[in-house]
Image: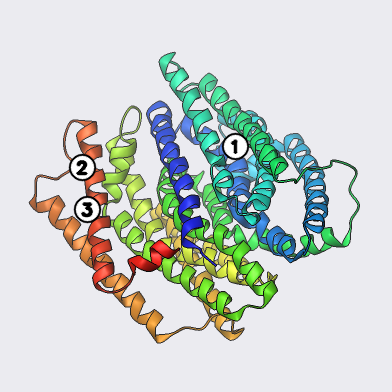
């Protein structure tokens, strides 16, 4: 079984989406800045975004794909798909209606720090109600993407977030052209474009599934054995797979008590989510259906090969990404966001949060891979247990540190709890003989850390002893300089990896 080629397709579309997402955030930063109306908008978006990340980034499919892959005939797969789609359709209708009716309560829970400002609080409620239908659309999109991925159609599924970013970019450009940024009217239109993009994604995915013979059938659901099996895996998988997002939710609640903290954490989160999506989420998306099939067929060699290749590849990419984000944190934030209402003080504050998040990046990414090892075996008990421990630890650390260092304490809590979660998952996978730590893997890990450290030394030299520094008055020059840093760092790290025999080009070309 090959993992590199489908991973390249998935990561390629994810990269396009994330680049567009950065452009979208650049426009948002220039239009809304940090604090004030920006905090209101980000809190309102937090509701559907948490569900989007938990569901659209594969957690829903953690339950669906292993059961779907076990079906022997195409007819059995189509029947199973129709039952699950129909059940989720009605569950989502109920959830959306409950949130729309009781939105003031949920907003109070999510952002209690805004309760004293009635104007901001009411605006958050209105925007949250306008944005929440996106949950309905994107959850169904997630399930449809699971069907497409299981049938090897990775590109279409991975391209869906592109339409979200395009929709919001077009809206922002229109608002800027009309000279209407940083206003209540602008965030209403921006939120509306957010929800409509979900409908566009759903229609495209329905068409893709229709072409492959999978057609939903909406009716009053019966709680069949298939649905019971699905729920048995789904509920703990959503909690376990979405622990990072739940930690971010906890952070949002605490951050609402400090002015601009929500915005600082949002912009930092947007940066480190890029490598998390390109590496951890993309590998998880490709690995789950292939590993589920290998386990069903009891092909031990394929199982071991898939697991080892996925873990090694994730570390090979995650560790240098972590080093790079920490070293270039201020440069990245200032180049991407520092314009309009977003000041140099905002860049400095956001970069501090990014450094801390970046320190936890290898853990965030590895959690995605190790959870997949359990989920492919229909085992959700231990990941759920460790996710709960992680959430409790994150909340305690964030609350304790927030008193003294503000929003940075939230970022520290998120990263530390992720590392603890990963350690527990690795220990359990070894105990259950799911994963075996090899001496060669430990040597490879040391080589990766050494290569990443040497890459940072090179970047330090470029920044401090050459003309390549990000201090020009020209935004274009600064942006190009940042790109040069990244390209040189990647090339140098790649050369080191080849010299240290961390990667073999012929195996990459074979997939």
Q: Where 509 sits versus 407, above or below? A: below
Q: Where is residue 237, by image quadrant? A: bottom right
Q: Residues within 10 Å of mark 2 (few under 14, many from 20)?
A: many
Q: Where is residue 331, by image quadrant? A: top left
Q: Where is residue 199, by image quadrant? A: top right
The Cα–Cα distance between marks 2 and 1, rounded to whole angstroms, is: 43 Å
N-term mark: 2 or 1: 1
Q: Where 286 sits versus 141, above or below? A: below
Between 419 and 232, the one lying in front of the other is 232
The Cα–Cα distance between marks 3 and 1, rounded to whole angstroms, is: 48 Å
Instruction: Locate residue 169, reporting x and y percent.
Output: 47, 28
| The disc label shown at residue 481, or none | 2
Identify residue for label 3: 488
- Marks 3 and 1 in Cβ contact (< 8 Å): no
Q: In the rendered picture of this protein, how many numbered marks are placed on residues?
A: 3
Residue farthest to the top, as pictured? 178
Residue mark closest to the camera, 2 vs 1: 2
69 relative position to 197: left or right: right
| Quarter of the image that includes the N terminus | bottom right
Identify residue for label 1: 115
| Quarter of the image that includes the C terminus | bottom left
Secondary structure under tag 1 reads loop
Q: Residues within 10 Å of mark 3 (few under 14, many from 20)?
A: some
The Cα–Cα distance between marks 2 and 3, rounded to whole angstroms, is: 11 Å
Give me the residue at 89% from left, 58% from top.
224
Residue mark closest to the camera, 2 vs 3: 3
């Amino acid at each position: 079984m090959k993992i590199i080629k489908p991973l390249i397709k998935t990561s390629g579309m994810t990269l396009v989406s994330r680049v567009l997402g950065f452009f979208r955030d650049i426009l948002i930063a220039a239009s809304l800045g940090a604090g004030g109306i920006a905090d209101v908008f980000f809190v309102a978006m937090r509701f559907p975004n948490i569900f989007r990340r938990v569901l659209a980034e594969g957690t829903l499919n953690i339950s669906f794909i292993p059961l779907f892959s076990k079906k022997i005939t195409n007819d059995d797969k189509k029947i199973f798909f129709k039952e699950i789609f129909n059940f989720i359709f009605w569950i989502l209708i109920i959830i959306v209606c409950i949130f729309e009716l009781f939105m003031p309560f949920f907003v109070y829970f999510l952002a209690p720090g805004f309760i004293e400002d009635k104007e901001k609080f009411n605006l958050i409620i209105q925007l949250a109600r306008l944005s929440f239908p996106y949950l309905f659309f994107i959850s169904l999109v997630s399930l449809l993407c699971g069907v497409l991925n299981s049938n090897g159609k990775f590109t279409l599924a991975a391209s869906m977030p592109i339409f979200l970013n395009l929709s919001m970019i077009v809206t922002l450009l229109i608002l800027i052209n009309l000279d209407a940024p940083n206003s209540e009217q602008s965030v209403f239109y921006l939120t509306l474009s957010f929800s409509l993009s979900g409908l566009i994604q759903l229609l495209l995915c329905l068409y893709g599934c229709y072409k492959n013979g999978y057609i939903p059938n909406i009716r009053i659901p019966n709680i069949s054995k298939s649905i019971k099996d699905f729920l048995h895996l789904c509920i703990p998988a959503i909690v376990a797979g979405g622990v990072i997002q739940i930690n971010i939710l906890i952070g949002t609640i605490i951050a609402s008590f400090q002015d601009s903290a929500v915005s600082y954490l949002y912009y930092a989160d947007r940066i480190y989510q890029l490598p998390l999506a390109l590496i951890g989420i993309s590998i998880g998306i490709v690995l789950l259906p292939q590993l589920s099939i290998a386990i069903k067929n009891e092909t031990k060699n394929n199982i071991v090969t898939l697991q080892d290749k996925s873990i090694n590849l994730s570390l090979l990419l995650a560790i240098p990404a972590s080093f790079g984000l920490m070293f270039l944190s201020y440069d990245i934030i200032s180049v991407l966001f520092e314009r309009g209402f977003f000041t140099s003080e905002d860049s400095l504050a956001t970069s501090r949060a990014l450094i801390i998040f970046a320190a936890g990046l290898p853990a965030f990414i590895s959690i995605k891979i190790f959870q997949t090892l359990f989920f492919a075996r229909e085992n959700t008990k231990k990941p759920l247990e460790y996710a709960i421990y992680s959430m409790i630890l994150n909340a305690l650390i964030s609350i304790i540190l927030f008193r003294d260092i503000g929003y940075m304490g939230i970022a520290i809590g998120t990263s530390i709890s992720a590392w603890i979660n990963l350690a527990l998952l690795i220990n359990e996978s070894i105990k259950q003989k799911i994963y075996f730590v090899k001496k060669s893997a430990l040597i490879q890990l040391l080589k990766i850390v050494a290569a990443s450290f040497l890459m940072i030394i090179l970047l330090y030299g470029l920044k401090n002893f050459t003309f390549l520094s990000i201090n020009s008055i020209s935004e274009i020059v600064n942006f190009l300089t940042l790109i040069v840093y990244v390209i040189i760092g990647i090339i140098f790290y790649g050369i080191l990896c080849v010299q240290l025999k961390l990667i073999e080009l012929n195996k990459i070309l074979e997939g």
